[in-house]
Amino acid sequence: MAKKVQRRAASRRKLQLLRTLTNSKSVRRRSIILNVLLHFHKLKVKLEEIQREYQNLMAIRNEYFNLLKHIQIPKEVKVEKLGEDQFVVKVRCNRGGDKLVSIVEAFEELGLNVVRARVSCNHFFAMEAIVVAQDQQTTKTKDVTQAILKAIDKQGGERIPVT
């Protein structure tokens, strides 16, 4: 007899828990179970909707990255003089090839040391560097700009990398 009472109490607790989870107002066991099934169905529909939305967003993202691969970034080289022998060099162009190596070689040919540099190669090549002239020689910004442009062009022009 005691086991029956315990089972009924456990059953009532479980039904009460289901009622609170589904915000059900009914007290009949059948109605509570139907409300739970309806709640599960609604959750399943919401999950499917979220999955469709996620797939759409991923398709848009992939299309965006695909378009970025085919955009031609114009070559952009800016050289500014900081002091007598210091320059700030900013380069931006399409990625591909060993542009960084060619630019550093061009610095070396001009007698410039790289003090600090920041390079990014995510969707295009971008570099910002501070360079200092060796031996206090006078270098013009125009010479540095032309050397960098030659180094970029030495890489085979503005090719689109195949990935």
Image (cartoon, rainbow, N blue to C red):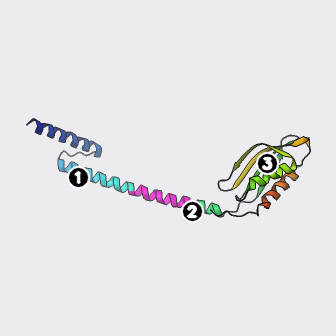
Where residue 150 sits: x, y (%)? 82, 58
Which residue type does callout 1 highlight? Leu
Where does label 1 land, which residue? 34
**Mark 2 Cα within 10 Å, few/some/many (few <14, many 20+)?**
few
Q: CA distance from mark 3 to mark 2?
A: 33 Å
Q: Earlier in the sequence, mark 3 or mark 1?
A: 1
Q: Is residue 33 left or right of residue 139?
A: left
Viewer-side label of 3, 1:
3
Where does label 3 land, which residue? 89
The label on residue 9 is: none
The residue range painted magenta reads 48-63
**Secondary structure beneath label 3:** strand
**Mark 3 Cα within 10 Å, few/some/many (few <14, many 20+)?**
many
Which residue type does callout 2 highlight? Glu
User: Between 48 and 156, which is closer to the camera in this rendering?
Assistant: 156
Where does label 2 land, which residue? 63
Where residue 47 sits: x, y (%)? 38, 54
Where residue 118 sits: x, y (%)? 72, 46
